[in-house]
Amino acid sequence: MVFDKGRDREEEQLEENEVVDEHEDIDKEEDTREDVEVMDEDVENSRDGKGAGDSDLNEELSARESEIEELTSRLLRLQADYSNYKRRTEIEKKGSIDFGIETLAIELLPVIDNFERALDAEEDKESSFYQGITMIYQQLIDTLKKLGIEEIDALNNPFDPNSHNAVMVEESEEHEEGIVIGILQKGYQFKDKVIRPAMVKVSK
């Protein structure tokens, strides 16, 4: 009987220990599940945070790219405006220079006419006066040529109303009708522009 009671107590103790162990296992399992859930939540939060960070970074990069494109476009426009301004300035500058040369030439043409009249009137072609005037006259003509001002070639050429001014008409057996057979006053052109038409005599 004593032995049976001892064994019964031992069995009860074992059952109690098993119950305690079972509760401990359940508690451990619940703790582990809670830890896993916490870890999952941390991972999810980490992912959400990383996604938000990437989104902010992408927005910033997009804003920077837009800013760069705008600045590049502005730079290209400024370069184009500067090129147009530079080209326009060069054209205006060249136009001003040409206008100045043309104006000066028109004022000098009567002086050249007087030089030529003086040379034609001088009888002594060997005199120092004639030689000196001829030298000055030639220097003046050479200077005008360097500036683009030249005499219009009219003699023995067909009459051209754009560069010739017919003041006389004369019959000629040596020339066809409409040929310049005499020059009363030389004409001049600046580059391709006539600044004074030649006064000519034309055959008929």
Image (cartoon, rainbow, N blue to C red):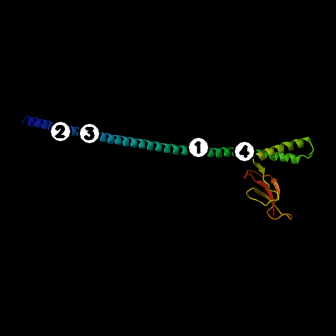
Residue 32, image quadrant = top left
In this rendering, which labeled residue sits more in front, label 4 or label 3? 3
Q: Which residue is mark 4?
A: 101
Q: Residue at x 26, y 41 (%)?
A: 33
Question: Dot 1: within a 10 Å radius of its alpha carbon, few (fewer than 14), some, or many (20 or more) residues?
Answer: few
Please tell me which residue lies in front, 58 or 66. Answer: 58
Residue 153, image quadrant = bottom right
Number of on-image labels: 4
Could you tell me which secondary element the residue under label 3 belongs to?
Answer: helix
**How far is disc 3 from disc 2 in space, using C-alphas?**
21 Å
Please tell me which residue lies in front, 100 or 171. Answer: 100
Identity, as a three-letter code, of the amino acid under mark 3: Thr
In this rendering, which labeled residue sits more in front, label 1 or label 3? 3
In this rendering, which labeled residue sits more in front, label 1 or label 2? 2
Identity, as a three-letter code, of the amino acid under mark 1: Tyr
Assess whether mark 1 and mark 4 are in contact (beta carbons under 8 angstroms). no
Please tell me which residue lies in front, 66 or 113. Answer: 66
Identity, as a three-letter code, of the amino acid under mark 4: Ile
Give the mark nearest the N terminus, 3 or 2: 2
Give the mark nearest the N terminus, 1 or 3: 3
Q: Residue 157: x, y in percent?
A: 80, 59
Q: Which residue is mark 2?
A: 18
Q: Residue 51: x, y in percent?
A: 37, 43
Q: Residue at x 91, y 41 (%)?
A: 128
